[in-house]
C-alpha cells in the first residue's frame, strides 16, 4: 500500500522537479500542494476538535452522574455523540492519513530513482553491481542515494543507457546536500541544520496544539456542572485524575515528533526538509483555522 502511494506521489514530485530542476524546491512545492489537497480534512479535524472540547463539560457530567453504572454511561455517551452529530472515532481518519503520508513519503525519498524517476528495478540492480565491482560500497538501506552520487561515473560507463541519464538529480539546496544522511555524516555540521530546524518547529507546533487544550482542560477541572442541580461536581480525587489525563495527553502529543526526529537522523535530508516545511505550513494552518472556524 505504501509503495502504491509513494508511486503516485512520485509522479507529482517528478513533475515539480522537471519544472524547477532543483530537488529541494520541488520538495517545498510538493509539501504545499499536499497540504492544499488535505485542507478539507484539516478543516474538518479542526471543527471536530473544537466541538469535542465543547462536549467535555457534558461528558464529565455524565461520567459523574453514571459513575456507578458503566453500561448506562456508555449508552448516554453514545446518545450524546449522536445528538451532537459526532463520532467517537472522528479523529481516527486524520491519524490514518498522517501515518500513510509518513511512511509513503519515506519510501519516496528513500528510493527517488524508483518512485520519482521510474527507473526499472533491473537497471538499478545493474548499476549497484557496477559500482560494487569497481570497489565502491553501496548502502543496503539507501542504494539509490549512493547511485545518485555515482551518477556521472555510471553515465560515462553506460553512455547509451536511457535510464542512466535519469540518475543525475540536483540535490543541492541552499548549500545543503539533501542526499546526505546525518547518521552517515556525523562530522559534517551541515547535516544537522534541517533536523534542528525541524525539532524547533515541532516544539512550536506542539506548544500551539497543547496550550489551547490545556487551557480548556483547566477550565473543565475548575468547574464541572450538574445539568440538573447546577452544582459543581468535582472532587479532589477527580481533579487529580484530570491532571493525570492532561499529562498523558501531553506525553502522547510528543510521540509522533520524537519518532519523526529519530527517522530524520537515519534518512536522507530530503525527508527532514519535507517534514520541516510541513510543520511550518501546519502551524500557519492551525493559526488561521483556529481564528476563523467556530
Image (cartoon, helix red, strand yellow):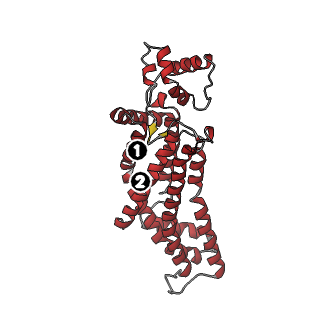
Q: Is residue 215 above or below residue 103?
A: below
Secondary structure of the residue carrying numbered label 1: helix
The answer to whether any part of residue 210 appears in the image is: yes
- Return the x and y of residue 259 as percentages of the image width and height: 59, 49
Mark 2–mark 1 contact, CB under 8 Å? Answer: no
Q: Is residue 103 above or below residue 130?
A: below
Residue drawn at the location 37% of the way across and 33% of the way down? 21
- Return the x and y of residue 112 as percentages of the image width and height: 48, 32
Sequence-first tag of 2 and 1: 1
Q: Which mark is residue 281?
A: 2
Residue drawn at the location 39% of the way across and 39% of the way down? 26
Q: Residues within 10 Å of mark 1 (few under 14, many from 20)?
A: some
Q: Residue furthest toward the right?
A: 237
Q: Which mark is residue 99?
A: none
Q: Residue furthest toward the top?
A: 160
Marks 2/1: CA–CA distance: 10 Å
- Return the x and y of residue 262 as percentages of the image width and height: 61, 47
- Return the x and y of residue 91 as percentages of the image width and height: 49, 57
Quadrant for residue 116, please give it: top left
In the image, taking residue 244 as reference, residue 48 lies left or right, namely left
Quadrant for residue 199, please give it: bottom right
Number of marks: 2
Residue carrying label 1: 28
Q: Residues within 10 Å of mark 2 (few under 14, many from 20)?
A: some
Quadrant for residue 50, please give it: bottom left
The answer to whether any part of residue 1 appears in the image is: no
In the image, taking residue 266 as reference, residue 40 lies left or right, namely left
Amino acid at each position: 500500500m505504501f509503495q502504491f502511494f509513494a508511486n503516485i506521489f512520485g509522479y507529482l514530485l517528478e513533475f515539480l522537479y522537471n519544472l524547477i530542476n532543483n530537488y529541494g524546491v520541488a520538495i517545498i512545492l510538493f509539501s504545499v500542494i499536499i497540504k492544499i489537497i488535505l485542507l478539507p480534512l484539516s478543516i474538518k479535524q479542526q471543527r471536530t476538535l473544537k466541538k469535542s472540547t465543547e462536549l467535555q463539560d457534558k461528558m464529565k457530567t455524565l461520567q459523574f452522574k453514571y459513575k456507578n453504572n458503566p453500561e448506562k454511561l456508555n449508552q448516554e455517551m453514545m446518545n450524546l455523540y449522536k445528538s451532537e452529530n459526532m463520532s467517537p472515532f472522528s479523529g481516527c481518519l486524520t491519524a490514518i492519513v498522517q501515518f500513510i503520508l509518513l511512511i509513503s513519503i519515506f519510501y519516496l525519498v528513500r528510493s527517488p530513482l524508483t518512485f520519482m524517476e521510474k527507473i526499472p528495478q533491473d537497471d538499478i540492480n545493474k548499476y549497484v553491481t557496477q559500482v560494487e565491482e569497481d570497489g565502491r560500497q553501496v548502502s543496503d538501506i539507501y542504494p539509490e542515494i549512493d547511485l545518485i552520487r555515482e551518477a556521472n561515473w555510471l553515465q560515462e560507463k553506460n553512455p547509451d543507457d536511457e535510464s542512466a541519464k535519469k540518475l543525475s538529480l540536483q540535490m543541492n539546496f541552499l548549500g545543503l546536500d539533501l542526499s546526505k544522511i546525518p547518521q552517515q555524516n556525523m562530522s559534517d555540521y551541515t547535516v544537522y541544520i534541517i533536523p534542528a530546524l525541524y525539532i524547533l518547529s515541532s516544539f512550536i507546533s506542539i506548544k500551539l496544539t497543547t496550550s489551547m487544550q490545556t487551557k480548556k482542560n483547566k477550565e473543565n477541572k475548575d468547574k464541572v456542572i450538574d445539568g440538573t442541580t447546577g452544582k459543581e461536581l468535582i472532587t479532589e480525587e477527580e481533579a487529580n485524575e484530570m491532571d493525570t489525563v492532561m499529562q498523558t495527553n501531553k506525553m502522547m502529543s510528543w510521540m509522533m515528533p520524537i519518532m519523526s526526529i529519530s527517522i530524520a537522523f537515519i534518512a536522507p535530508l530530503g525527508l527532514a526538509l519535507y517534514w520541516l516545511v510541513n510543520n511550518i505550513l501546519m502551524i500557519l494552518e492551525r493559526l488561521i483555522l483556529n481564528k476563523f472556524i467556530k
